[in-house]
Amino acid sequence: MGKTPPGQTREKVFRFVQEKLLEGRPPTMAEIRDHLGFRSAQTAREHLERLARDGRLEKMPGARGYRVVGGAQAAAVPVVGRVVAGGLSFAAEDIDGYEAVEGGHGLFGLRVRGQSMRDAGILDGDLVLVRQQATAKNGDIVVALVGDEATVKVLHRGGKRIELRPRNPAFRPIVPKELRILGKVVEVRRRVT
């Protein structure tokens, strides 16, 4: 890498690290080296150490252990598989990557399959971020486990009867004998390609 004005390269290192932290993927020294065209990973380490001394990054435990000081902290939320917005499907926890979420502690993500929640703005392929909790209020959009099968629906309680209601008139409510609430949907993310 050619000579740059003082501080400019360090600022590029900081911006790259910040971007990767917000994606939930702290960069390795090799990734920093390759992205900025350094000859060695040691150069990347020296920039990180200087940013830490300057108070812009904080060294945390672990090989990739840095966080931005004073900024909003993103958590790497696990995307633990898929959930059906339709009928029921077998619920298998299978980590399928991570999603960066500001203040995302206590959340998990699921990819939606199906159209039963279309009118609530939850479409096939969307990522729902779910706050892990065992209870929910009437009208909350929840991820519920009925037996070994999971679905995303609106929780409705009427007397002793509990229903999991779709938000698409082409689908019927599910009236489970037993159910376990895994969490409440707090955000929907959609990627436009």
Image (spheres, rainbow, N blue to C red):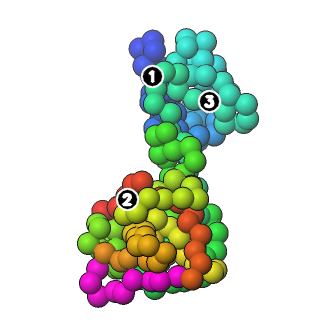
Q: CA distance from mark 2 to mark 1?
A: 33 Å
Task: Residue 129: say if magenta.
Answer: no
Viewer-side residue, 110 vs 24: 110
Mark 3: secondary structure: strand
In the picture of the structure, the residue carrying the numbered disc 1 is: 11
> Which is nearer the N-term, disc 2 or disc 1?
1
Residue at 50% across, 67% down: 143
The rendered magenta stretch, by its main secondary structure, is classed as: loop
Classify residue 124 by image quadrant.
bottom left
Looking at the image, residue 31 lies above or below residue 49: below
Residue 55 in the image: state x and y as whole percent: 55, 14
Q: Nearer the viewer, mark 3 or mark 1?
A: 3
Res. 96 in view: no
| Mark 3 neighbour density, 10 Å: few (under 14) some (14–19) many (20 or more) | many
- Residue tagged by mark 2? 188
- Look at mark 3 in the image and give the residue it sits on: 66
Query: Which mark lies nearer to you, 2 or 3?
Result: 2
Q: Is residue 172 magenta?
A: yes
Q: Secondary structure at mark 1?
A: helix
